Amino acid sequence: MQEQLGQASEIYNLVVAFLVNYSFQILGAILILIIGIYLAGKISNWLFGFCQSKNLDITLSRFIANVVKLLFILMVGIIALGNIGISVTPFVAAIGALSLGAGLALQGLLSNYGAGLNIILTRPFVVGDTICVQGVTGVVTEVTLAFTILLDEDDVRITIPNKHIVGEVIHNSGPVSLVEIDFQVAPDTDVPGVLKTAMEAVRATDGLDDETNALFGVSKLSGAGLEISGRIWVPTEKYFHYKYAIIEGLHDRLRAAEVTLVIPAQEVRLQQD
C-alpha cells in the first residue's frame, strides 16, 4: 500500500512540476492554435470570395482557398509546437516515412487525387458543363480532388472517380447540344414548304423560340425521294425532352400539311435453281 501511495505521489509531483514549468507555454500554444485556425478560416473565405469576384472557376477557387487554409494551419501548428519547446524535425522525418508507406498502400486513392488536381488545373470542364465520359452523360455539379459528380436528365447523381476521367475521351457539349432529325419525302414534294413547316414546328416547341439555332435542308437525293435533315441546338439539360417534342410537333405539322413521308423499302428477290 505504501509503495502504491509513493508511486502516486511521484506521478502527482511530476504533473505539478510539468504544469508549473510549462503551463504558460501550453496555454500560449493553445491560444496560438485557436487564433490560427480562426484566421485560416477567415483568410480562406476572403480568398474564395476574391477569386469569385475575378470570375475564376468555382472549383479552382475552392481548391486555392482550401490549400491556403491547410498551409496556414500547418504553419500555425509548427509555431505552436515550437512555443512549448517541441522540435518539428523528428515529426517531419516520421511524416516522410509514413507518407511512403501510405503511398504504396493507397495508390488507387492517390491516383484519384492526382487526377483531380489535373482536372482542376487544366479545366477540361467546369461546374455547369454537360459532359459524356465512360459511357455516362450528365451536368457537372461538383468537382473534388477524389471524384466528379454528374447529374443526368433523370436526376440521378453519378459519381465518377477522377482516375477514370483523366486520359479518356471527354465530350463536353456545354449548355447546348445538337439534335439531328432525318426524314424522307416524295420526289415531287414542295421542298421550300416542307423546310418552312419544319422550322415552324421547331419554333412552336414549348421552351424554344425564334432565337433557337436551327437548320433544315435537303441532305440526299435518291430514287425513292428526298431526304430532309435537320440540326437543332437545344438546352443540354433537357436534351431528350426537346428532341421528342420536336419530332412529335414536326410529325403533326407535316401530316396537317398533307406531306407524304416516304418509308425506305428494299426489294428482295428469291432465286430458285
Image: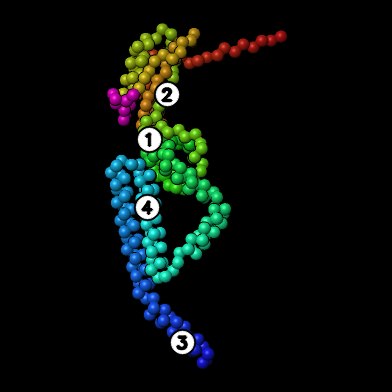
Viewer-nearest residue: 196 or 12: 12
- Magenta residues, start to end: 204-213
Residue found farthest to the top: 188
Quote the CA–CA distance across marks 3 and 1. 73 Å
Residue plotted at (31% across, 30% down): 207
| Position of residue 256 in the picture relative to residue 110 (left or right) | left
Kindly identify which residue carries mark 1: 237
Kindly identify which residue carries mark 4: 68
Which of disc 3 and disc 2 is earlier in sequence?
Answer: 3
Quote the CA–CA distance across marks 1 and 2. 17 Å
Residue plotted at (38% across, 66% down): 80
Quote the CA–CA distance across marks 2 and 3. 87 Å
* Residue 9: mark: 3
Residue 209 is one of the magenta-drawn residues:
yes
Which of disc 4 and disc 2 is earlier in sequence?
Answer: 4
> Dots 3 and 1: beta carbons under 8 Å?
no
Quote the CA–CA distance across marks 1 and 4. 35 Å
